[in-house]
Image: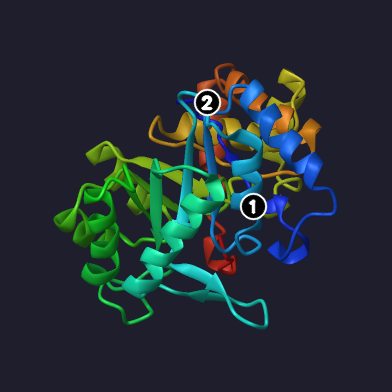
Amino acid sequence: MNQVGYGAMQLAGPKVWGPPDDPDSARRLLRLAVELGVTFFDTANAYGPRVVNRLIGEALRPFPEGVIVGNKVGAGRGPDRSWIITDHPDTVRRQVHEALADFGTETSELTYLRLGGDGPAPPSGVPLEDSLGALVELREQGLIRRIGLSGASPEMLARAQKLTPIAAVQNRFNLLDRSGAGVLAGCEADGIMFVPYFPLASGRLSRHDALTAPAERLGATASQIALAWLLRRSPAIVAIPGTANPGHLRANVAAASIAEHLTDAEVARLTGLVDESAAVLDQPT
């Protein structure tokens, strides 16, 4: 699998609500990603809601061989467009069926359960055994091939692994926010794919001098260097930078080759940057 995937959240309308201004451009961008070698796409029922999943289905089905779409369930949108946890087992089942209808497929290659908490239990109060159990049932029915977690603490990952094999975990992790380091270590130990969301730190990278020298030496942008550092950080990582711009998409994919040319000293200096995770507000994914 290509270590640079694609996060599709930005294909929805403003504030991830409703359709984009130009759905045809969104579909072309998804096809371009496949042409550039992207094999992993990240999305969620809550994006739109359901808008992005439909765009992915319209653009890519039948999905090319080797392409995996990771879809998050267990989160939704309120009447005021707020982000809410919707991890009741019945809702989880309904969202999986909705996603399959939107993709136009019979099976989900990867479905994440959105947990959204840093503690030992889901903040919604729904037992993990119940919500995750719904996905296990759907996998046994052949509707899901792999199960993942999104927003998991090390404790929740350990609990989940007692219930079912976990194929992927999506947590916040980037050059400036190492809050997911503990979960990443667990994923590395157990052969689990780690998918950091907001891999470009939501655009807060440009002020860091440690990016300037390698960017100038390699003819790259600060964002490409930040992505390249992620890819060097661990072979378990599959990054999912998002964009609605074809040029930015090409630049993000090119970060994979740039990673090969970062020196160990440059990687060490970037790794030594101050972890700013305490100053980062939680954001929906």
Q: Picture quarter containing residue 217?
A: top right
Would you name the residue on which mark 1 appears?
52
Q: Determine whether the residue tagged by mark 2 lies in a helix, strand or loop.
A: loop
Q: Is 198 left, or right, of 244 in this rendering?
A: left
Residue 51 visible, this angle: yes
Which numbered marker is on residue 181? none
Tell me the quadrant of the picture where the N terminus can be found. top left
Q: Residue furthest left?
A: 162
Q: Residue furthest right?
A: 21
Q: Nearer the viewer, residue 55 or 219?
A: 55
Q: Determine whether the residue tagged by mark 1 lies in a helix, strand or loop.
A: helix
How many residues crowd around disc 1 within 10 Å: few (fewer than 14), some, or many (20 or more)? many
Which numbered marker is on residue 64? 2
Residue 176, compared with residue 214, is above or below; it is: below
Q: Is 49 left, or right, of 135 in this rendering?
A: right
Residue 80, compared with residue 119, is above or below; it is: below
**What color scheme is it?**
rainbow
The kind of residue tagged 2 is Pro
The residue lying at 69 percent from left, 62 percent from top is 16
The kind of residue tagged 1 is Val
The residue lying at 80 percent from left, 31 percent from top is 247
Q: Is 2 left, or right, of 82 in this rendering?
A: left
* Among the two numbered marks 2 and 1 on one chain, the one whose residue lies closer to the N terminus: 1
**Mark 2 vs mark 1, CA separation in Å:** 18 Å
Q: Picture quarter containing residue 25?
A: top right
Q: Nearer the viewer, residue 37 or 262?
A: 37
Q: Position of residue 212 (x, y in %)?
A: 74, 33
Q: Position of residue 235 (x, y in %)?
A: 40, 29
Q: Position of residue 215 (x, y in %)?
A: 73, 27
The residue lying at 56 percent from left, 68 percent from top is 282
Tell me the quadrant of the picture where the C terminus can be found. bottom right
